[in-house]
Amino acid sequence: MLKHPKILLIISCGKQKAKELQFRKMQASKAYTGPMFQVINKAQREGNWGSNLFLGIVSAKYGFLRSIDSIEYYDMQMTKEIAGKHNSEVIRGIMKWNEEEKFNFIYVLMGKVYLKAVEGLETHVNTEVKVENMGGLGLGQQKLVRFLERLSEKRTSLIEFMK
């Protein structure tokens, strides 16, 4: 039983970005300000984001980002073609981080176009992976809230957590 499994949450970037990003580079987790990031920021403010939880972001411009990576302003929309081109680089980025951190669980929550960028991830990492389609932004936010609530319930095993 793992008391505090190390978990990697991977979401997609968003169109909404901090205004300051137009003038300077920013940390990815602070640069994106859309609905999914609002859920994450609220969880962090309320103490529902543990030190065992890490954030990865799939970006139309940058491919795979760790939350602490710095980015510049861009306006680019993810397409199936771009996601396909980023796929091997995104998988390599996740694999590298997984090798360093030894995650117990990787949870991917994105829209179907972005999911092309992580297609095949499960076969490349020796870690439990759950890939989920958001099913629309509102539903995606609900899924993210539920995921974070389950983590804050202090579940003691990954099997319980994944239910």
Image (tube, helix red, strand yellow):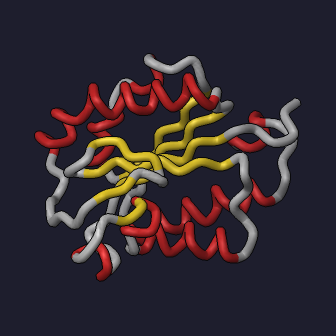
Extreme residue in the left direction: 81
Q: Position of residue 36 (x, y in %)?
A: 46, 67
Q: Is residue 74 visible?
A: yes
For the point 64% across and 56% down, which residue is it?
Answer: 147
Residue at horizontal 58 percent and vertical 42 percent from the top: 8
Please give the name of the residue rendered at 75% of the width and 69% of the height, measured from the top-left corner.
47
- Give the camera-side residue of 41 and 151: 41
Q: In x, y percent, where is residue 140?
A: 46, 62
Residue 10 x %, y %: 47, 47
Rendered location of residue 98, percent (x, y): 55, 28
In the picture, which quadrant includes the C terminus? top right
Q: Is residue 42 left or right of residue 17?
A: right
In the orientation shown, which residue stands out farthest toward the bottom?
Answer: 19
Of residue 108 and residue 162, the one placed in the foreground of this image is: 108
Report the side of 115 relative to 106 (left or right): left
Q: For the view shown, which residue lies furthest in the front direction?
A: 24
* 67 shown above or below 142: above
Residue occupying the point 35% across, 35% down = 118
Q: From where the camera sits, is residue 109 visible? A: no
The quadrant in which the N terminus is found is: top right
Report whether 1 appears left or right of 27.
right
